[in-house]
Image (spheres, helix red, strand yellow):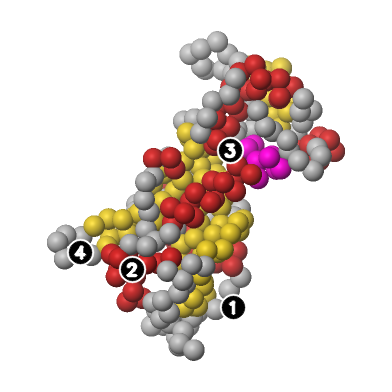
């Protein structure tokens, strides 16, 4: 068994596992667009240094809970903290770090074992309500559909996270984590369209909403908007817990 590598030379710093890591897919919503947070890495090259993009992630510490590791790594690599993260899959391809030769050559000196199994997490944040000033300078919000390539197998991880998010939306009211406390039906429709990368018929969408007793009309309208103010709604979790079935059931 290979020896465990320490994060730093300080003997008080916990040791890390050479074969287990976590990677985090942080979905955000801003300006009617779904976004994902990615991190750039400076990869040396014989010609010139290159910046490559990856998901936030790293190996876990020995005896560290996986969820605790995900939160720690997010704080260290992005600046974000106190996010609710949920594991959604394990990626165990023995060659997952070798998809691109220059990626592997960059990370190889820090490896004690060529095979690293990663547990992938995803989280939802409303970009408009977080403090973006805490973000590290090497991270960026990007529309996931614009991403063609990431380091290692991270594009595959991202794609699977998006599939999982879409699936979970059928069973859980996660969409309201990305909306303001008070929202219009147009805002809700645009959010669904951003996540599923499609468009919905306005009439059919609203007909679906009317069947949901936990989406409550507030008898208030928008303020300070250039267009005709729309009526506002809110999500009532207490009503949802009493009324919902096993399935959130939002298919348009």
- Residue 124, percent across and down? 57, 46
- Disc nearer the start of the sequence (4/1): 4
- Disc nearer the start of the sequence (1/2): 1
- Disc nearer the start of the sequence (4/2): 4
Measured Cα–Cα span from mark 1 to mark 3: 33 Å
Measured Cα–Cα span from mark 1 to mark 2: 27 Å
Residue 63 image label: 1
- Residue 247, percent across and down? 76, 41
Q: Is residue 68 visible?
A: no
Asked whether 171 falls inside the magenta stretch, the response is: yes
Task: Say which element carries label 2.
Answer: helix
Q: Can residue 222 be seen in this view?
A: yes
Measured Cα–Cα span from mark 4 to mark 2: 12 Å
Task: Say which element carries label 4.
Answer: loop
User: Does 154 appear above or below 44?
Assistant: above
Residue 104 image label: 2
Q: Quadrant of the C terminus?
A: top right
Q: Report the residue at 55% width, 35% height from top.
A: 196
Question: What stretch of residues is rendered in magenta?
Answer: 168-176
Measured Cα–Cα span from mark 4 to mark 1: 36 Å
Residue 45 image label: 4
Residue 178 image label: 3
Measured Cα–Cα span from mark 3 to mark 4: 40 Å
User: Does 180 appear above or below 57?
Assistant: above
Residue 214 image label: none
């Amino acid at each position: 068994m290979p020896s465990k590598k320490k994060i730093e030379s300080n003997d008080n710093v916990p040791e890390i596992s050479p074969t287990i890591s976590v990677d985090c897919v942080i979905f955000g919503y801003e300006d009617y667009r779904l976004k994902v947070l990615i991190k750039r890495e400076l990869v040396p090259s014989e010609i010139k240094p290159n910046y490559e993009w990856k998901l936030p992630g790293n190996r876990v510490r020995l005896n560290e809970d996986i969820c605790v590791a995900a939160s720690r790594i997010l704080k260290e690599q992005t600046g974000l903290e106190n996010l609710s993260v949920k594991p959604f899959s394990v990626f165990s391809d023995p060659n997952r770090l070798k998809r691109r030769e220059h990626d592997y050559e960059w990370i190889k000196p820090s490896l004690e074992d060529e095979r690293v199994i990663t547990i992938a997490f995803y989280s939802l944040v409303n970009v408009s309500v977080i403090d973006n000033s805490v973000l590290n300078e090497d991270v960026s919000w990007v529309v996931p559909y614009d991403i063609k390539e990431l380091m290692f197998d991270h594009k595959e991880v991202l794609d699977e996270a998006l599939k999982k998010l879409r699936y979970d939306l059928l069973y859980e009211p996660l969409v309201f984590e990305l909306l303001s406390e008070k929202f219009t039906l147009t805002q809700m429709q645009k959010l669904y369209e951003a996540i599923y990368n499609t468009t919905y018929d306005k009439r059919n969408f609203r007909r679906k909403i009317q069947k949901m007793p936990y989406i409550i009309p507030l008898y208030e309208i928008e303020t300070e908007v250039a267009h005709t103010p729309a009526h506002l709604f809110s999500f009532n979790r207490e009503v949802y817990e009493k009324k919902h079935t096993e399935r959130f059931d939002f298919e348009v």
